[in-house]
Amino acid sequence: MRQLLRALLRFIINIVARVDVSGYENVPDTGNFVIATNHLGFLDLPMAFYALNRWDLFIPVAEKWEKVPFYRFLGKYFNFVFIDRFNPDIKALRKIMAQMDEGKNLVIAPEGTRSRVGSLIEGRPGVSYLATRLGHPIVPVALAGTEDKVIFGNLKRLKRSHIIVKAGPAFRLPPLPRQNRDEALKQYTDEIMCRIAVMLPEKYWGVYAEHPRLKELLEGSK
């Protein structure tokens, strides 16, 4: 069933868009890792399965979708973990850690929700906390062209969209300090978001456009 669903997924996306994927070499061949990506539209969720020919991935999804039978069906095969985005969800955290212990790899959007402005919004500290707690490398992935208004606008004109999926070098965050943990989490979250931003066109930089860390990364990439 998974192979059938993946073939169907690729067929549908290839009709809707031309997808350019780069950075495969940055995805670890062995060991656990966390994929951190920006979130622009509904196509972001299946992009990991489209771009990577592997099933050892799982994705946190907002708990509201668990009430939709179609999403529950997909969740069985695409390894969804339904979470409460607005309150501490210890049960979901335990599920995530259990999935990682089983050898699966987390795909998550630090922003926590789709950007309604078409560019980066402020990341939440949950990904940083998980990454430091689990101790696994983070692979930043930048998505461009998946905005819902762009996808649907092109569909109305019977035009394929152009989607870019780019993975950057994996990196690790240091363990959380005993003191000033909130400040450290903010710094770690900004690090993740700036590493995503540096791979995106300038129009997507959003709230990180003037961030000093992004400017450092841009300077280093020249």
Image: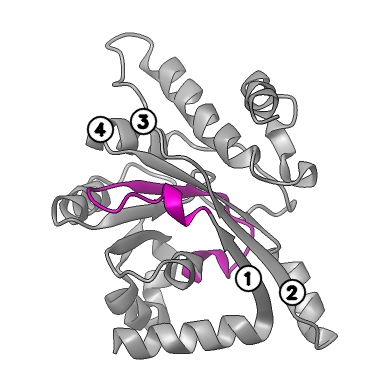
Q: Position of residue 206 (x, y in %)?
A: 73, 39
Q: CA distance from mark 3 to mark 4?
A: 11 Å
Residue located beneath label 4 in the image: 133
- Labels 3 and 4: the sequence-earlier one: 4
Q: Is residue 112 above or below residue 184?
A: below
Query: Front-most of 121 and 201?
Result: 201
Specify the quadrant that holds the C terminus: top right
Q: Is 153 left, or right, of 192 in this rendering?
A: right
Rendered residue at 33%/36% (across/down): 131
Write down the quadrant of residue 211 in the picture: top right
User: Three-letter amino acid code at disc 2?
Assistant: Ser
Q: CA distance from mark 2 to mark 4?
A: 38 Å
Residue located beneath label 3 in the image: 172
**Local secondary structure at mark 3:** loop
Q: Position of residue 92 (x, y in %)?
A: 26, 52
Give yes or no for residue 40 being in the magenta stretch: yes
Rendered residue at 48%/70% (across/down): 46
Residue stretch rendered in magenta on the structure: 23-46
User: Three-letter amino acid code at disc 1?
Assistant: Val
The local crowd at label 1, few if under 14, some if 14 to 19, many if 20 or more residues have their Cα within 10 Å, is some
- Labels 4 and 1: the sequence-earlier one: 1
**Local secondary structure at mark 2:** strand
Select label 2 or label 1 by which is in front: 1
Residue located beneath label 1 in the image: 19
